[in-house]
Amino acid sequence: QLQLVESGGGLVQPGGSLRLSCAASGLDYHAIGWFRQGPGKEREGVSCISSSGGITYYADSVKGRFTMSRDKEKNTVYLQMNSLQPEDTGVYYCATRPRFYGCSGAPRVYNYWGQGTQVTVSS
């Protein structure tokens, strides 16, 4: 059973930064995605990284501000979030799908999810 554990959320002012972490073992051959769900909104894809770490995808709303990376030695995936805005507020989740499947922005195709970490951007 794959397990993912997010951390790093918190309260930050507009324009600030946070780095989220997703600790997950046994995922060397898995793509991993970050998703978020804002108040009253549907869950949406934010970013995804390939199993090798060589390919990353970003939602248009976060391009140029968010950077996703993975450290296989530490079994951890990161989401560096800069220039945060109130619309970035939400619960952030990392998720994965069966091994060898590539990235997708559709939450429904991901089988394993972390518990989520709250990000609040407010002055």
Image (cartoon, rainbow, N blue to C red):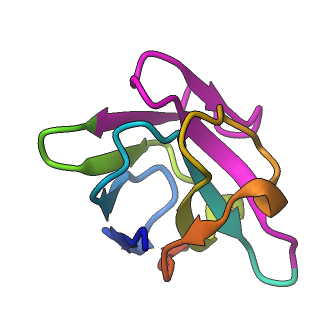
Which residue is painted at 83% across and 62% down in the image? 108
**Residue at the image point whose x is 62% and y is 52% from the top:** 97
Q: Using the rendered view, name the quadrant where residue 63 is placed.
A: top right
Q: Is residue 49 a member of the stretch shown in magenta? A: yes
Residue 3: x and y in percent read 39, 72
Residue 23 in percent (x, y) is at: 28, 62
Residue 70: image quadrant is: top left
Q: Residue at x 56, y 60 (%)?
A: 95
- Give 12 or 62, whichever is nearer the viewer: 62
The N terminus appears in which quarter of the rendering?
Answer: bottom left
Q: Is residue 25 visible?
A: yes
Of residues 85 and 30, the one nearer the viewer is 30
Locate residue 99 relative to residue 52 in the image: left or right.
right
Residue beneath the point at 40% across and 25% down: 53
Q: Which residues are magenta?
A: 41-70
Percent position (x, y) of residue 59?
73, 37
The answer to whether residue 35 is above or below residue 5 is: above
Q: Which sits in the foreground, 79 or 30?
A: 30
| Residue 72 pos. (x, y %) | 22, 38
**Magenta span includes 66:** yes
Is residue 123 visible in the rendered image? The answer is no
**106 over 102 or under it: above or below:** below
Q: Nearer the viewer, residue 71 or 61?
A: 71
* Residue at the left extreme of this rendering: 73
* Count of labels in the image: 0
